[in-house]
Structures are given as structure tokens and as C-alpha cells.
Amino acid sequence: MANPNSRTSLIEYCLRALGSPVIEINLDDDQISDRVDEAIQYYQQYHSDAVVRTFTKFQVTQANIDTQTITLDDSLLFVTRVLPIGQSNSGSGGLFSVNYQMHMNDMLNMTRGIGSLINYEMTKQYMSLINMTLNGLDQGIIFSRHQNTLKIIADWTNRIPLGSWIIVEAYTVVKPYTGSGILNATTGQLVQAQGAEYGYQDVYNDLVLKKYLTALLKRQWGQNLIKFEGMQLPGGVTINGRAIYDDAVNDITAIEEMVRLTWEFPPDFYVG
């Protein structure tokens, strides 16, 4: 299949690219499976097409309050921020909050041709400066990806009561299809079946992923043959696993450099 849509068809595609079935590719099934996982992991780590910005909500439980931590899904790569929780001390909430009254007055003035967006933006920035000076940050966060936890540094007693909602802005990986389910022809997403993991089949057809997995399999193939280097087969053919291995290493280096320079998200810079 020229356009792989499953793990099996992706493996078959890459093996054909290496010469199968004309040439016997000396790889064990477990080795192939390991290289597939490695290729998908690298793709999800560094390729922007494999990452999606998302918002996730959590309802606060007593366990969250006791630990000041919430547990995240393991598909989240990193957390950018937690939306402001509760009201600041600069004003009361509801209809009597400073922000609400300012919005009402400014919107009314704009409809009458009084004021402008410039004045509105300057006022918002000035209010933010006052709140920052008097109250400091609403909350800080400590995200641990491998522990799948997000610790929120805030006054949980007064600002994050039991049963309230926390909204997290994060980036999550696009998972390929690895289970059983019904494919939605419109969205391309699989409807989740009981006990199944679902995702997007089109990930398997990504050009970078196909090339990278082919190079990884080629390196593994060459590594397997290196131990037989110089051995002469019937007909005078000599095995040269070192050449296959070195060629694959060059391919992998070129692909990784291309991905990091072309498709990787730029790093965030913090000043102050």
C-alpha cells in the first residue's frame, strides 16, 4: 500500500522501500516493532504536525486540594498556562467587579463613537499592572511530564474551592490508530470502541515518518549484518553490513536535522 493507514501497512511500506520481498531483510519482528515505536516517538516529540494546541478542564476534588496537584493525560507534551482561577483582590466579582463595569462602559462608549480600542487596551494594561503590583501573579505552575502532574502554586483554600473547574492550556500529541473502532469517513477519526485506543490513521502516511522509520529499519538491518561482515556466500557474494549501517546513519542524521530545522516548534524565551 503506497499510502499506509495502519501500523502493519506502514511496516510493509518501509520494508518494501528497503528491497523486500526481492531482498530478504534480516530483522526480527520485535526489532521492527521497537523501531516503529521509536520513529513515532521522535515524530511526536519534534514534528509540529504531530502536536495540537488544546484546552483541558478538570474539576477539583479533595485529593487535588490536599496535594495542590492535578493529574494529566500522558499524551500532553507540555503545559503553557492555567487560565486565571477565581477573582483577584482588586475587586469583587459578578456585576460589581471592576472588569465587568469597565467592559460595559467602554462598549457603550464605542457604540456612540466615544473613545477607541487604543484607550481600551491602554486601560486594560494599566489595570493589569496595578493587579500585578498589588497582588502578584494569580498562580504559578510546575509541570512534570513524566509524572503526568501539574502542581498549581496558589491559595487553594480561598481561590480554588472543592468542585470548581480548572482549565489548562497545553499541547498534546496526535495519536495514530492502534486499536479497533469505526472510522468516521468525514473527520478521519475513529469512534472509540470499548477497550480500544483510537487516533488518526493519516499519521502513518506522513512522509517524514515513513522516511525516518525506513532509515531506522535500515540501520537495524545493517547492525544485524555487521557481525557477518566479510563472510562470503555461495556465488562469491560478500556481506557488507557496515556499508548498510553507515548509509542508514547518514540518512537518520539528515532527516533529524531537517525535522529540527523545518518543523520543530521554536523554543519559548522568558525574560525577567
Image: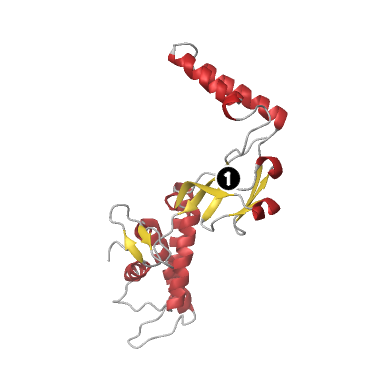
Instruction: Judge by depth and name the residue closer to the eye, 54 or 154.
Output: 154
What is the x, y in percent for residue 237? 36, 82
Residue pointed to by mark 1: 166
Q: Residue furthest bottom?
A: 234
Left or right placement of residue 88 versus residue 31 in this view:
right
Left or right placement of residue 75 versus residue 16 in this view:
right
**Quadrant including the C terminus:** top right
Instruction: Judge by depth and name the residue closer to the eye, 192 or 118.
Output: 192
Which residue is at a point 50% across and 13% down the rendered structure image? 115
User: Residue 250, can we see it?
Assistant: no
Looking at the picture, does residue 95 appear above or below residue 7? Answer: above
Q: How many marks?
A: 1
What is the x, y in percent for residue 253? 48, 59
Left or right placement of residue 61 versus residue 169 in this view:
right
What is the x, y in percent for residue 268? 57, 42
Looking at the picture, does residue 103 appear above or below residue 172? Answer: above
Looking at the picture, does residue 127 appear above or below residue 48? Answer: above
Which residue is at a point 45% across and 78% down the rendered structure image? 225
Q: Residues within 10 Å of mark 1 (few under 14, many from 20)?
A: some
The answer to which image quadrant residue 95 occupies is top right
Looking at the picture, does residue 270 appear above or below residue 221? Answer: above
**Quadrant including the N terminus:** bottom left
**Hey, what amino acid is under mark 1?**
Ile
